Amino acid sequence: VMEGYNSVVAIVAEVTVDSTMDVVVDKVTAVVDGGTLVHPDQALAQVQGCINMGQGVGLISEITVKNGIVEQDNFDGYRAVRINETPKVMDVHFIKSDGAPGGLGEPATAVIVPAIANAIHAASGKRVRTFPALPENVAAG
């Protein structure tokens, strides 16, 4: 659960962890209290996009530093989630509210990584403490 930017977001993830410790996000369920939704379709797209971005940060996107310099200086060296790697099911539910509109990007992005980490633990018994949750980091948990 994340509260910020005049919004509250809760996310639960369901994953599959195979014998090589590779993680697949099967389903994500999000509940969002973002106040009054001015453009509901855009609000949905924003939350879905942030879930996908956060999934990448949690599972595959890695920033490495060599000799004090970040090695990934462009998108050709920074792995992002591809459409076929996004959750098969993504349920986003908005709580109806008359409150002031809130932010929808940052809260959803921030809360998906811990949701995936908890799902990995539920599926494998492994606690991921180093991200991204690459197979070697899951196995070390």
Image: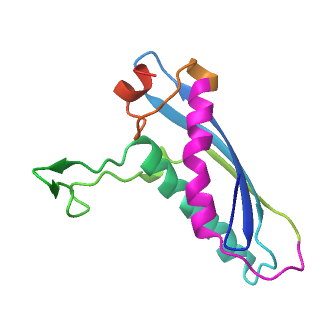
Q: In this view, does 53 lie above or below 129?
A: below
Number of numbered labels in the structure image: 0
Residue 115 within the segment the image draws in magenta: yes
Q: In this view, does 112 lie above or below 43?
A: above
| 51 relative position to 62: left or right | right
Q: Is the magenta stretch mostly helix, strand or loop?
A: helix
The foreground one among 86 and 31 is 31
Q: Position of residue 88 (x, y in %)?
A: 60, 43
Q: Where is residue 61 in the image (x, y as percent from the top left)?
A: 36, 49
Residue at 44%, 26% in the rendered image: 138
The foreground one among 104 and 43 is 104
Residue 74 within the segment the image draws in magenta: no
Which residue occupies the extreme left position in the image?
Answer: 67
Q: Position of residue 40 (x, y in %)?
A: 74, 76
Q: What stretch is highlighted in magenta?
A: 97-121
Q: In which quarter of the image is residue 39?
A: bottom right
Residue at 56%, 29% in the rendered image: 120
Q: Is residue 92 above or below residue 114?
A: below
- Residue 15 visible to the viewer: no
| 139 relative position to 108: left or right | left
Residue at 23%, 48% in the rendered image: 64
